[in-house]
Every structure is written in C-alpha cells, then in structure tokens.
Amino acid sequence: MTSKNTICLWFNGDAVEAAQFYAKTFPDSDVGEIHRAPGDFPSGKQGDVLTVEFTVMGIPCLGLNGGPTFKHSEAFSFQVATDDQAETDRLWHAIISHGGQASACGWCKDKWGLSWQITPRALMAAITDRDPAAAKRAFDAMMEMTKIDIAVVEAARRG
C-alpha cells in the first residue's frame, strides 16, 4: 500500500466479495493485495482473509474482516458524481440489484450496509443555482426522490 491516507472499511468476513463488487461496478477501481491472518483473531482463524487492499474510483481502501461487532452507518458514504442519467441509473441499479436498498435523495446502501450517494452533477448545479428560487425548486424536487431523475430536477429548476 503506497497511499499515506487510506479509508479502512469494516466487514464481517466478506471484504473480498465487497472489493470485487466495487471493482466490477465503478470505473478506476480494482482489487489489490489480499492478506491472510498470521494467527487466530477474535472473528477468525489463522489463514483467513484479514484484509484486502482495493481502490474505489481511485480512492485507496482497505477492507478489514473485523467481524460482526461494528456496522456501517450513514455517517460515512461514498458520493459518486455522475455525468448523465444513464450513469446514474447504472450505478444505482448495480447497488440496489446486488442486495442493496434505496433511500432518499439519491442515497442507497449496498448489501454490506455501506452508504452511497449517486449524485448527478446536474443536481449539484441545480441546487446551487445563483437564482435562489430555481435552486429551491430543484432542491424540493430532489427531496421527493429516491434515485435522482435529472429531467425532473431540470424541469423544476426552470419552473
């Protein structure tokens, strides 16, 4: 591992499966070294996969098979800026159809409980519009959505 700062994500024995899913789903993502435990540990035995190095969209991560003690929460999420509706739909559906669940305003959780914000760049432009009324209309439209619909956001922005 060469990065000075790496995100460590806690898994319950399935860090490799998660890393492989992320590498398959997101561009500029891959699975690196898999490290096995040199001895027994609270949630595993010597030789079990302890950690897996991987990147998600260029961000270095370490999956730690730490056991069932800690769960992911919305306090941490990956925010993915998408360029169009097709990319938004592809990523959203990849997460949801692989055991994930939808949430509000472009958020969803993968099957491991990790939160993702699938956020079209068009949404961010709309809710930060210099016209406060346009920004509010776009924001209000977003607040009614699960997966973001860019056409609906843009229509609301225009009024």
Image (tube, grey):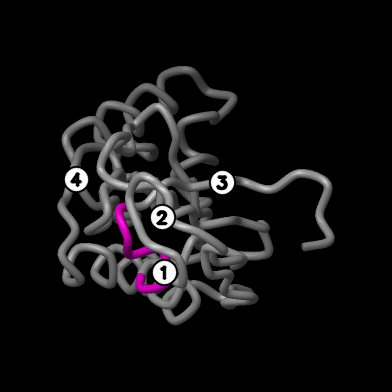
Rounded to the nearest whole Å, what is the CA distance between mark 3 and mark 1? 18 Å
Amino acid on which the number 3 mark rests in the picture: Cys
Residue annotated with mark 4: 146
Task: Choose the circle earlier in sequence order: 3 or 4.
Answer: 3
Give the camera-side residue of 91 and 138: 91
Rounded to the nearest whole Å, what is the CA distance between mark 2 and mark 1? 9 Å
The reply to whether discs 2 and 1 touch (Cβ–Cβ < 8 Å) is yes
**Residue drawn at 26 percent across, 47 percent down:** 113
Near mark 3 (Cα within 10 A), the count class, few <14, some 14-19 or many ≥20, is some
Please identify, in this view, whether the residue under mark 1 or under mark 4 is nearer the observer. 1
Is 134 drawn above or below residue 156 in the view shown?
Answer: above
Amino acid on which the number 2 mark rests in the picture: Asn
Task: Choose the circle earlier in sequence order: 4 or 2.
Answer: 2
Amino acid on which the number 4 mark rests in the picture: Thr
Check residue 65 in the rendering and tell me which mark sits there, or answer none.
2
Q: Quadrant of residue 144?
A: top left
Please identify, in this view, whether the residue under mark 4 or under mark 2 is nearer the observer. 2
Near mark 2 (Cα within 10 A), the count class, few <14, some 14-19 or many ≥20, is many
Please identify, in this view, whether the residue under mark 2 or under mark 1 is nearer the observer. 1
Residue 92: where, in percent of width, then height? 29, 63
Residue annotated with mark 1: 48
In magenta, the rendered stretch is: 12-17
Q: Quadrant of the N terminus?
A: bottom right
